[in-house]
């Protein structure tokens, strides 16, 4: 495994870092405070070609790899978690499903939206179907060349903002259930409404909302694929992306703590000279390296069958990075003392933002079940009916 960036990737990283430091960082607190979607940042990301960079060149993208995309994600997350999440969803997740399973016509119609800065939303979760996603009740009935969607989703990142929505539903044809499918629904389609926004602990500039579908009709071609496994294989890239947002938040907090530990003096010495803090920072450094290596491995050792990150490697990387990020951001906050807890500094925001990643996109427990199923060779986490 050689994870050295090639000159093209190095240039991409430098470009992303410059944009993050000069433009994204000074505005990060604003989105947290106002809870507004960072459209100004989206404009910059779009102009820099960082939205849809994984789209093949024949469709107007840069044909970049998932690895390239996470290099950018880390740079954004070092200064602003929500901007990094937009880069994830603008390059992975639902976009991956569209690229792999969408018809030529759908790709020609919807990929330009992403290149114009629209991050697709992915709607899986329901009130009674969280970790147990296959218990979802939203139905998509095929009739007369259309799919008729009925049901409700919750916690959807970018609900109401995203023009493209990939909605998971139980597909029914001729009265028979075919399995769980992914249906593309454009914002504004009749019968599709955006419901209540949930106000969250962190990552506040992107809305998490309910989505409701009532007799919502879309052409049958909008059904990208049927089969939960197919859909989730493309979703593994989003897990690698989410793990990288956690990594970037942790890296950013750690770098600030390192600088502060050298500058802040107590008892006549820099606080970084005290063993209690030296070891804390050393532990952060160890965990950051480990998380990055696991994420890089997951982003490069792709499943040969699907072309997407391997399920087990993605789960390992996301669990490790998300748990490490909670500790690292909190330790960085500790290094800053009262300043760390103050809203005058970014540490408290970064710790709140990092807290999410052991929950969204598969909880740390659900992903341990994925790993357990894989290493033990059979599923032990089956759904209990009734
Ligand atoms: C900020 C944010 C953004 C999100 N964005 C999206 C989105 O864009 N699209 C989308 O579809 N969803 C989204 N989600 C929802 C997310 O995917 C779910 O929260 C997640 O799958 C867990 O479901 P749940 O919250 O219902 O928890 P539950 O599944 O009810 O779990 C509750 C607790 O029980 C544990 N648990 C459950 N089952 C098991 C088991 N078998 N073994 C051990 N422990 C278990 C869980 O780990 C957790 O600790 C988002 C969530 C958040 C917080």
Image (tube, rainbow, N blue to C red):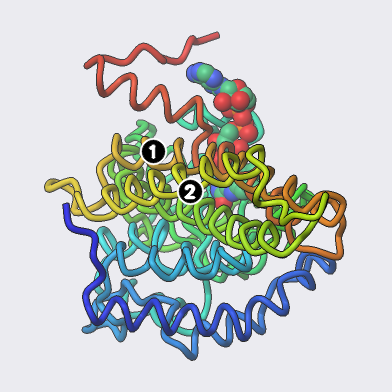
Mark 2 = which residue?
285
85 lies left or right of 14: right
Specify few, some or many for label 2: CA neighbours under 10 Å numbering under 14, 14-19, or 20 or more: some
Q: Residue reaching furthest left? A: 304
Residue 377 lies in quadrant: top left
Q: Residue reaching furthest bottom? A: 47
Residue 203 lies in quadrant: bottom right
Residue shown at 79% from the left, 53% from the top? 340
Q: How far across and down, in percent of the image, does residue 183 sit?
A: 43, 54
Residue 181 lies in quadrant: top left
Residue shown at 57% from the left, 39% from the top? 279
Residue shown at 23% from the left, 83% from the top? 57
Q: Nearer the viewer, mark 1 or mark 2?
A: 2
Where disc 1 sits, the SS reads strand
Q: How far across and down, in percent of the image, does residue 87 sit?
A: 49, 69
75 lies left or right of 41: left
108 lies left or right of 150: left
Quarter for ligand 1?
A: top right
Q: How far across and down, in percent of the image, does residue 155 sit?
A: 65, 46
């Amino acid at each position: 495994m050689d994870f050295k960036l090639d000159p093209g990737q190095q240039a991409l990283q430098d470009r992303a870092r410059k944009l993050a430091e000069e433009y994204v960082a000074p505005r990060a607190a604003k989105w947290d405070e106002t809870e507004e979607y960072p459209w100004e940042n989206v404009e910059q990301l779009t102009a820099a070609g960082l939205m849809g960079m994984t789209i093949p060149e024949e469709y107007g993208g840069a044909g970049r790899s998932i690895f390239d995309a996470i290099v950018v994600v880390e740079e954004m997350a070092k200064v602003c978690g929500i901007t990094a999440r937009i880069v994830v969803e603008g390059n992975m997740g639902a976009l991956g499903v569209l690229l792999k399973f969408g018809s030529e016509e759908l790709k020609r119609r919807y990929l330009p939206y992403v290149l114009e800065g629209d991050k697709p939303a992915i709607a899986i979760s329901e009130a009674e179907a969280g970790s147990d996603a296959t218990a979802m009740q939203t139905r998509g009935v095929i009739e007369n060349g259309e799919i008729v969607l009925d049901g409700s989703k919750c916690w959807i990142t970018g609900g109401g903002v995203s023009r493209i929505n990939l909605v998971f539903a139980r597909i029914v044809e001729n009265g028979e259930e075919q399995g769980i499918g992914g249906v593309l629904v454009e914002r504004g389609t009749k019968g599709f409404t955006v419901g209540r926004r949930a106000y969250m602990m962190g990552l506040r500039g992107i809305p998490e909302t309910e989505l409701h579908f009532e007799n919502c009709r879309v052409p049958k071609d909008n059904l990208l694929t049927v089969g939960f496994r197919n859909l989730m294989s493309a979703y593994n890239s989003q897990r690698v992306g989410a793990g990288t947002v956690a990594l970037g938040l942790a890296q950013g907090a750690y770098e600030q703590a390192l600088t502060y530990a050298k500058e802040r003096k107590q008892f006549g010495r820099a606080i970084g000279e005290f063993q209690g803090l030296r070891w804390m920072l050393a532990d952060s450094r160890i965990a950051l390296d480990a998380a990055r290596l696991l994420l890089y491995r997951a982003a490069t050792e792709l499943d040969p069958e699907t072309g997407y990150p391997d399920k087990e490697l993605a789960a390992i990387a996301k669990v490790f990075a998300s748990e490490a990020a909670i500790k690292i951001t909190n330790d960085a906050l500790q290094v800053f003392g009262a300043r760390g807890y103050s809203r005058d500094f970014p540490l408290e925001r970064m710790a709140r933002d990092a807290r999410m990643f052991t929950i969204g996109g598969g909880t740390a427990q659900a992903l341990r079940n994925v790993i357990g199923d894989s290493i033990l060779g059979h599923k032990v986490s089956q759904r209990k009916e009734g």
